[in-house]
Amino acid sequence: MICSKSGRFMVTIIIIWSLVSIYILLSFNKDARQEGCAQMRNPETSIHGRKTNQPRVEQRVTPEDEDDHPSWGDHRLAIIVPFRDRFEELLEFAPYMHSFLNKQKVRHQFWIINQVDSYRFNRASLLNIGFLVSRDSCDYIAMHDVDLMPLNDNLSYSYPSKGPFHVSGPGLHPLYHYKKFVGGILLMTGEQFEKINGLTNLFWGWGREDDELYVRMKEANLTIYRPQGITTGTTDTFLHLHDKEKRKRDTKLYYNQYKMTTRRDRSTGYRSLKYQEVKRYQISIEGAMVHVVNVELHCDKNITPYCSIPE
């Protein structure tokens, strides 16, 4: 009887201890789940490798998910870059502009129009191609040199509804300051670009196509707007990456080039452009998605024999 009572006592102790253990375990798991949920709601963030207890207020808006954020607006900008042998500049340009435009909440795409034929560089024709290949996805364009990047956050890339907007206007551009200058960075809506039939296709080599573009816009009664209230000047508004020695400009005139490039071209534009698209692909440069279009331009040497340098 004594053993029987002792055995029952031991069994009772074991049962009580088991119940206490289960209670403690359940309580621990509950606390752990609550802590885990708290961590999900208030995750630790890392700044340069150091953990902080600051809560992440909202997810960073990126171009990939910007469609879910109405604050970015309804318009999409095509950054059109006429291009040849400027890969080093592109590696700096794309990620920098990607960040700059994100800060302004400007929906955007990069279109690099890469001339791969053996003719002299034709900036205007490449811009025409850029408009054609991007117009289904973008409703306004920035004709943008790859070696020119804005340093002043107050330079707007928003939709130019009133008229063409010349971001790199005289007094701001590092080099050019004459009144009719519209080169460097110029924003236009698709309708404005169509109204002037784009740019001339007769200009091979460097320069003058912007001046002809200015005349086209004036004849179409388009008012050209420029940044106002900018406190920076010619030395600190833009970063200009052009290396005069490494990137020597093709400024020589051949055959009848002077005559053809000092008058208003009324025969060519984006509608009359002839070219061959060789290849189209996408690359990511430090998070900036870039569309690259390799093209070969057409040259009628009966009209513009200066598209090639004479031997």
Image (cartoon, rainbow, N blue to C red):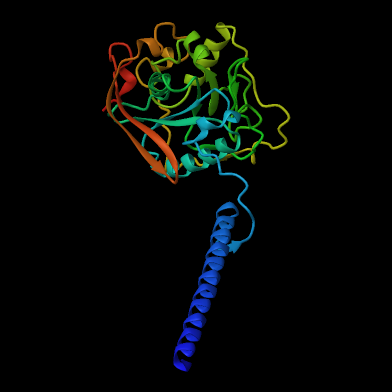
Point out the residue furthest to the front here: 1
Q: Is residue 297 left or right of residue 74?
A: left
Residue 162: name its quadrant: top right
Task: Tell me if residue 27 can be seen.
Answer: yes
Nearest the viewer among 166 and 252 is: 166
Q: Residue at x 60, y 21 (%)?
A: 165
Across and down, in percent, residue 150 comes to 58, 37
Task: Tell me if residue 243 can be seen.
Answer: no
Across and down, in percent, residue 197 comes to 45, 10
State the quadrant of the C terminus: top left
Numbered-mark total: 0
Residue 89: name its quadrant: top left
Nearest the viewer among 261 and 241 is: 241
Depicted 78 relative to depicted 217: above or below: below
Depicted 94 relative to depicted 215: above or below: below
Q: Residue at x 62, y 61 (%)?
A: 52
Across and down, in percent, residue 12 comes to 50, 80
Q: Residue at x 44, y 6 (%)?
A: 266
Q: Residue at x 73, y 36 (%)?
A: 231
Across and down, in percent, residue 68 comes to 52, 32
Q: Is residue 130 left or right of residue 35?
A: left
Nearest the viewer among 223 and 300 is: 223
